Image (cartoon, helix red, strand yellow):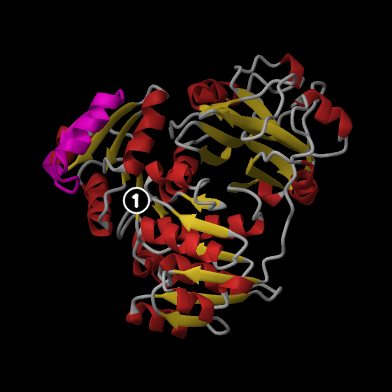
Amino acid sequence: MKVIICGAGQVGWQIARHLSGENNDVTVVDNNADLVRRATETLDVQGIAGFASYPDILDRAGADDADMIIAATHSDEVNMVTCQIAHSVFSIPRKIARLRSQSYLDAIYSDLYRRDHLPIDVVISPEKEVAEAALQRLAAPAAFDTEEFLEGKAQLLGITIDEDCPVINTPLRQLTDLFSTLRCVVVGIRRDGKLFAPEAGDQIFAGDECYIFTHTEDMTRALEIFGKTTMRQDRLVIVGGGNVGLTVAQALEARTNRVRVKVIEKNRPCAERAADALERTIVLNGDGLDQALLAEANIDRADAVLCVTDDDKTNLLAAVRAKTAGCSMTICLVNDPTLVPLMQPLEVDAYINPRATTVSSILRHIRHGRVRNVYSIGDAEAEMIEAQVLSTSPIAGQRVRDIDFPEGVLVGGIIKGGEMIRPKGGTRIEEGDVIALFALAADVGEVERLLQVSIDFF
């Protein structure tokens, strides 16, 4: 399949990395020649330096016979014009655009993206994706990473194993025997910076970062088994009242269980806009790093602080200051992946990587067949893939133990007859089942073959 990716920043680079690794013909376009050079030197892709919205640049990129274009530059307007030219001049069948401005995303203007107006097949909103990720982090405060699967029946949780974990040094096979009714599978372990899919004889050690796939109803029990306690989030302070903070606050206001939320926003017009849009939430105009303002927000009594300004360092420092003042749970928005190793020494409990959430959202839409959900784990180290099993799939009709999965692939859960079950060796996978698979990046292509899915749209 031939794909043009416009924008060679972190999102464009990660998408190019995924698609080129799956033997697709990928061309990256960016007006920054250094970013294009980085992509061509580190990935198996072609590169064109120039403005993605210029027809001659798209022509040079091979738009005449491209199957898909992904417009992920830093400009909404460039992304929109690029999709229009891709449709009107080159008839590219599939067009995906990343749009940030909330005005472009308002539901009342949804007709704008019809094929006879501005032909964009899929619109990705990073702010909405990040807000949803923040809400999921708040729902599982003991986890540093979370994602929902199988129609809300399952959760992928990333948790750090502490010294006092009750099941430390216990083989996974023994955990299965001890907790036979628990619908939970350890699908991935990151140890000494390396992520792998564990085998039945592997043990869990202190300092490991474990990815567990659990039935939503068993989430609390699963966390307790791994030494994590769940806390009610009744009081929340949000540092940053922009699009992300406002969306989270509005979602919390809409819930039936009341959550007391206070928003701190430095920019006065932005704070006034948030105050006008919110009904029960207190909005404070000031600096989230100001100790006196944090005290005014009763940070010492807050169950969690969510730092979502547009500056990574402000988010980190605000989280540290809130923790020092007595807040028990801190969650940060961090764009720069090189800052992630600072989380543990700074005692930041969880983080949200907006690029990772955007990449995951784009992957959901470019994988065809019966793929329902895709989540990119870590620095594109692995994926959690949810798909419906087709009759043409090599795994249809086989028992789990008989399927020749690669070493980096594990089955996390299966939906049969509307119910999620924990997979066992004797579980037979049948046509129509929905299966969730953990796959290391190198094994994603083989997973697609086993599921008989493709990103080919024709």
Quadrant into which the C terminus falls = top left
Quadrant into which the N terminus falls = top left
Residue depicted at x 80% and y 47% = 221
Front residue of 245/410: it is 245
Location of residue 439 (image quadrant):
top right
- x then y, percent, for residue 424: 80, 26
- Does the magenta run of residues contain 1? no
Residue depicted at x 64% and y 67% = 303
Residue 433 visible in this rendered orientation of the protein: no
Q: Which residues are magenta?
A: 31-56
**Residue 122 against residue 428 in the figure, above or below:** below
**Left or right of 205: which side holds 379?**
left
Front residue of 203/432: it is 203
Front residue of 116/154: it is 154
Front residue of 268/72: it is 268
The amino acid sitting under disc 1 is Ala
Location of residue 417 (image quadrant):
top right
- x then y, percent, for residue 237: 54, 71
Residue 32 visible in this rendered orientation of the protein: yes
Residue that label 1 marks: 97
**Left or right of 406: which side holds 272?**
left
**Residue 245 against residue 229 in the figure, above or below:** below
